Image (cartoon, rainbow, N blue to C red):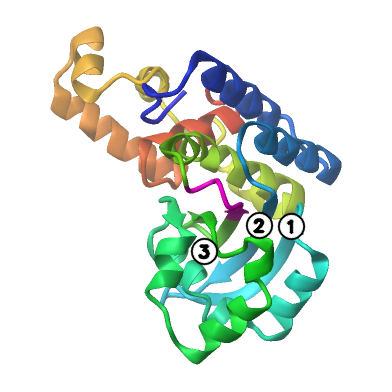
Amino acid sequence: MMGNTSSLSKKDLLDALEIINYSIHVKKEKELRNLFGKVQYILPSRLIACGIVKINAGIKIDKILKIFNHSFPNDLIAFYLKLQYQKVDPVVRTALQNEGRIVRRTVIFKNYHDKLRKEYIKDASDIGILTGLSFGVCEHANSITTLFSFCDKDIERHRRHEIILGVLMHHLHLSVLKCCLPKNIQKLESTYSDTLTTREKEILKWVKEGKTNWEISCILNISESTIKYHLKNIFIKLDVTNRCQAVARAIHTKLLDL
């Protein structure tokens, strides 16, 4: 399991591991809903939705490909799309610009005071949509990005919630793509089959165990610069930008065992 999990309880770690394991096998929308039900069991996230979008070179939404609405009111989603709020929503903009990082919705909305924001929150504030955690994860090979929103009045109150989402985010991203855009993800994943060398898989296995570059260099008796070189190649081959994403990709494509 990746991420800074030292502050999590043993139960939190086991629950997160169970969710990751379940996410690997998700193939149908019913299973995807069960997956997010498991997330709701360990996090205060009453409202959950995910948009799959195509982004352009300016890191803006070019097209909405799919909306997976787990528990938002359907009329709110329809209202949002009808007024095309996705084009100016500061949460969406911030999540795209901070790809792979969790952003707090209250912090974002606090900095926006324009007319559109007032219109947006007027109909949404009473159901808690202004408070929550959001993030985006991008498939750089085809510019497809998932944008997640977990909204609840309590979810921003404890650092634990951000840490757990940080552990789960890349697994949730891949599960949503597998269910909602199976052809796209299958095409991408077919390129990863046997793409890593034995040494690269060995290094990634230790990355999955949470080892630092220095620790891996000691274990394998090679220089730290060689570890960095291999990691750079791993990231390129798997079309990822960080260690957590690389491990999630390798697990979901069966390059690594959980």
User: Which quadrant, please, contains the C terminus?
Assistant: top right
Gap in angstroms between the C-alphas marked 3 and 2: 16 Å
Which dot marks residue 68? 1
Say which amino acid is labelled 3: Ser
Q: Tell me if 226 is positioned left or right of 72 in this view.
A: left
Number of numbered discs present? 3
Quadrant hosting residue 225: top left
In front of the other: 50 or 15: 15
In front of the other: 202 or 56: 56
The percent position of residue 77, horizontal first and vertical second, equals 74, 70
Question: Disc 2, disc 1: CB below 8 Å?
Answer: yes
Region rendered in magenta: 149-156
**On screen, residue 138 above or below 253:** below
Residue position for label 3: 143
Quadrant hosting residue 6: top left
Q: Residue furthest right?
A: 30
- Residue at 37% across / 47% down in the picture? 241
The secondary structure type at the circle numbered 1 is strand
The percent position of residue 123, horizontal first and vertical second, equals 68, 77
Q: Is residue 151 magenta?
A: yes
- Mark 1: few/some/many CA within 10 Å (<14, 14-19, 20+): some
3 vs 2, front mark? 2
- Residue at 40% across / 63% down in the picture? 107
Which dot marks residue 50? 2
The secondary structure type at the circle numbered 3 is loop
Q: Residue furthest front?
A: 126
